[in-house]
Every structure is written in structure tokens, then in C-alpha cells.
Amino acid sequence: MRIRVMTEKDVSAGLRLNTLCGWNQTAADWLRFLKQSPNGCFVMKQDTNVVGTATTISYQNRFAWIGMVLVDPERRKQGIGTQLLNKTIEYLDQCHISTMKLDATPQGKPLYAKLGFVSEYEIERWIVKRSAADSVSPTSRRTPAGLTRVQLDQICKLDKELFGADRGFLLHSLQDQAPEFTMAVWEQESAQGYCFGRRGLFADHLGPWMSTSRAVSEKLLHAFLTQSSRDTVIVDCFQSNSMTLELLNSCGFTLSRRLTRMVRGPNTHPGRPDSLCAILGPEFG
């Protein structure tokens, strides 16, 4: 086995692995990783087969995100995930990025802890599965007016404060590929809330999602559910945000799994997670 840098030719292999593991990423998501971190995404090869992956994304060099640590189910318990994770840490150390973050499953948390990651806060994945009768038909669905460049720039500026670093490149990518999911509530030209979304392999994913009040949160959630034509919708929200959990529960969402956001190194740019309803996703932060 050997580790090498991932290329676009490996996207189909990455997609195969995340499909085998029941993850929701698409080829477009893999290309997002490669575009933003062409030298920081890796695959483990065994003969001619890709049997594992890991990705990194740097946010202004304030901190980097580690994600997509995937291992072929038939090759687990061989140390592949550990080797790939060590490779990402080695790469980020060489880039002089001292702070690294990731969202850990309960199974992965002990491994990350051994490598110096500590818990920051808890995240919960909530899922709703809708019947055809619950979904809004395409003919009755109303596409919201698109954001102007000035409005999108304002949202990116606000998101930088809440997230802890600029990730406007990802928000612009979400807007370009799923503009029907990019929505905001304004008051006197000031954003009171916003949300983005993406179409995953088997579900639509809401996030990031931010608002200043319950009324705005509810308006954005219902608007997203109206725009989505899929029978499954996913939201990764903060466990401490009781308002968000209540809204999701009222719309038929149920708890699917728990994750722990973990950090290695100085957490000098924590952002304001208490102001966010949902993250972009465990693979992006």
C-alpha cells in the first residue's frame, strides 16, 4: 500500500467509497476539495485500487479542516485510516497551519484524541424522510429571488465572523450549483438570517444556516423544505441550540447520529457557533 496525492482521476474512486459507507457526498463535493486543496487531499492505493481517502481544506491559514477519512469496508482494521490521518497532519504541519479541526464520529473520537485532538462541542445530525404527498410539486414550488453580488458579499462577511474564517469560496460554490437553496431574510438591508444547501447523493443538505431569531429560523427552514424536491433532507446542527432542535422536531426530523467537533492546536479563531443553527457539513466545517 502507498499514499499519494489525490487527483481528479480519483474522484470516481472516492465516490465509490463514500457510497459504500453510506455518505452523502457527490462528485461535485470531491471536486470542491481538490480545487481548494490540490496538494492536501490523499488516497491510499493497494495495487491499482483506492482503498482509503482523506482531505484537507485551509481557511485563511487560521485553521484547516480534515475530512473524508474513508476506508473501504473490506480493508478496515488495517491501520489505513490512521495512516491517512497522520498524512494530513504531516501535510498541514509542513504548511505551518497549527490549528486543525474535524467532526468526529463516536467510533473515530478515541483515535483523534490519541493524536492530540480535544473536544470543542457536540453536533447532531437530524434527518427527515418525506412521502411524495409531503413534498411540494415542482410546478407549485416558488424559486426565491437570487441574491445580488452585494448581498452575497455581505453574507460572506457575516459568515466569516460566525465561522471564524473566510469560506466565501465554498459559499459561492454552493450558490452557483444550487441557487434555489441560497436564501436570506433582510431588514433594512441587513441580513437577519441566511441559508445555503446542496444536493447530495441521496438527500438534500441544509447548511450553513444562521438566523437572529426563531421567526427567521423557521421562515428559512420552511422555505428550504419547500424548495427541496427530495424525500430525504439532512441538517447537522449544534446540540446546544435548543431552538433549532425544536424547529426540526416540529417539522418531522429525527435524530440520526451524534458528532463531536474536535480541535488540535491553539483555537484562536473559534467563531461564534452559538449564532449558527447548522453547519455546512462534517466534511467542510
Image: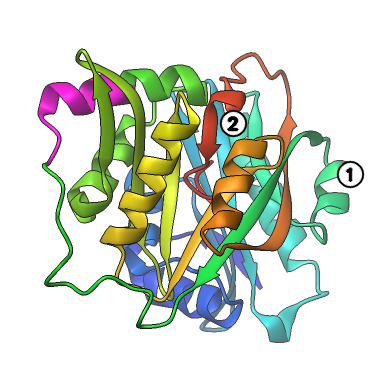
**Residue highlighted by disc 1:** 114
Left or right of residue 156: residue 266 = right
x, y percent for residue 277: 53, 37
Label 2: few (<14), some (14–19) or many (≥20) C-alpha neighbours in 10 Å: few
x, y percent for residue 163: 50, 26
**Residue highlighted by disc 2:** 94
In which quarter of the view is residue 168 placed? Answer: top left
Give the main secondary structure, helix, strand or loop, of the magenta stretch.
helix
Foreground mark, 2 or 1, reads 1
Q: Residue at x 62, y 46 (%)?
A: 246
Q: In which quadrant is the N terminus drawn?
A: bottom right
Closest to the observer, 285 or 30? 285
Q: Amino acid at mark 2?
A: Gln
Left or right of residue 265: residue 12 = left
Whether pointer 2 and pointer 1 mark residues with C-beta atoms closer than 8 Å, the reply is: no
How far apart are the two marked residues, 2 and 1, measured between alpha carbons?
20 Å
- Considering every residue shown, the one lying at the far bottom of the view is 74
Left or right of residue 272: residue 16 = left
Do we see residue 55 in this rendering? yes
For marks 2 and 1, the one nearer the N-term is 2
Q: Which residues are magenta?
A: 146-156
Q: Residue at x 49, y 22 (%)?
A: 162
x, y percent for residue 5: 48, 56
Label 1: few (<14), some (14–19) or many (≥20) C-alpha neighbours in 10 Å: few
Closest to the observer, 36 or 285? 285
Q: Secondary structure at mark 2?
A: helix
Q: Is residue 46 above or below residue 227?
A: below
Q: Does residue 153 belong to the magenta stretch?
A: yes
Left or right of residue 41: residue 155 = left
